[in-house]
Amino acid sequence: MTEQDIGNNKWIALDVGGANIKAAHSDGRARSLPFELWKRPDDLADEIRSLTRALPAFDRIALTMTAELCDCYQTKAEGVSAVLDAVLDVAGERPLCVWGTDRRFHAVDAIRQQPELAAASNWLALAEIAARLVPSGPGILIDIGSTTSDLVPLADGKAWPRGRTDTERLQTGELVYVGTRRTPICAIATELPFRGNPTGLMAELFASTLDIYVVLGEIPSDTADLSTADGRPATVEAAQHRLARMVGADSAGFNAEDAVEFARNADEAVLSRLMAAAQRAYQPTVGTPRTAIVSGSGETLARRLAARMLGPEGTIVSLRESWGPVASSAACAHALIVLASEQVESVDG
């Protein structure tokens, strides 16, 4: 593929995750589709097809993924292969290139031979482009989604991660399995204050971080959203009931003021955990950041973390403000479009 090919064709970039599928089109449009892949793995191609039909026609596809870790697959290699098969089903005769953790695009056959290159690669596409917003000095990308947070050191226009695989990134602090919706409360703390007393938490999926941020008003209530710990609506009242169970209580002994206090303490536990991970990520590489790029569906939390990390002298750059709400809603896919336009001629195979 040549640069002339790029100019004459329309691209779509797919970011296939285990809980969400995101797509960006080269005309600037983007879409996101919640999809619990581990429950319906055989429906992946149909879900991708439904998502792409909501966007304009396209001639070529760029792909990145994190869905390979879903426990419906025995191995990551099996997961990568399944995602490839689903996207190829949608692609038909249209060319497909796959982003790798070596910062390059690859042909499908090459990824079949080295599936580890494609596994959990989406964060690096975003980091490569976000780094350009930090042309000088140390910085950090703080991308917080529904399930995970990516904390990638940046400096002088480049991304400086130490990890490449999920395991390596968990060890370096660059990946934290904490998000603003799907993280069980019992995964962020073993005890929290309740009415002034340290109180052990139930080690059950009674509530998730979605309940924290609905109660605190950072996520709007949504009566149609049933993707909660108990399958009841994502409303303040229902969230209060779910949080009560974390301390072995119910609505009779856990009022609205208790819910707000509990949510604030839980939010502080989230921030503390992310702060510790970020320090582990940036200290050995770029040093204390002066700039933070914040993004993701949890950008409000990312901004608060950045303010704590940088202090009053730091600079916080919002991808929502820099790229617009549409592109930032599918940030990894949008970044992939940019990278494909620059690098697609180097696809191997």
Image (cartoon, rainbow, N blue to C red):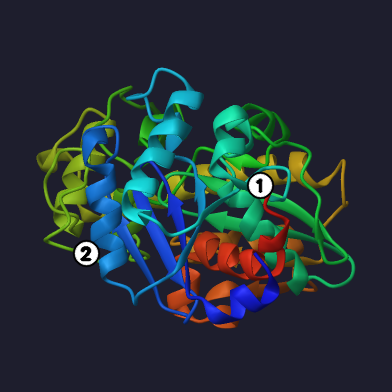
SS assignment at label 2: loop
- Pointer 1 or 2: first along the chain: 2
Where residue 26 appears, x then y in whole percent?
50, 76
* In the rendered image, the vertical position of residue 125 relative to residue 40, given as above or below: below
* In the rendered image, the vertical position of residue 85 relative to residue 298, given as above or below: above
**Quadrant in which the C terminus appears:** top right
SS assignment at label 1: helix
Where residue 178 appears, x then y in whole percent?
48, 42
Q: Give the residue pinned by disc 1.
A: 275
Q: In percent of the image, x 82 and y 60: which residue is there? A: 158
Q: Residue 159 is drawn in which quadrant?
A: bottom right
Where residue 23 appears, x then y in whole percent?
41, 63
Q: Residue 292 is drawn in which quadrant?
A: bottom right
Is residue 119 visible in the rendered image? The answer is no
Q: In percent of the image, x 29 and y 58: which residue is there? A: 33
Residue sticking out furthest to the top: 74
What is the CA distance from the residue labelled 1 to the residue labelled 2?
27 Å
193 and 34: which one is in front?
34
Q: Tell me, for residue 221, which label it has, or none.
A: 2
Is residue 153 visible in the rendered image? The answer is yes
* Circle 2 crowding by C-alpha within 10 Å: few under 14, some 14–19, many from 20: many
* In the rendered image, the vertical position of residue 98 relative to residue 158, given as above or below: above
**Quadrant in which the N terminus appears:** bottom right
The kind of residue tagged 1 is Met
User: In the visual, does 182 lie left or right of 230?
Assistant: right
User: In the visual, does 209 lie left or right of 116?
Assistant: left
* Circle 1 crowding by C-alpha within 10 Å: few under 14, some 14–19, many from 20: some
Q: In percent of the image, x 38 and y 48: which residue is there? A: 87
104 and 222: which one is in front?
104
User: In the visual, does 159 lie left or right of 208?
Assistant: right
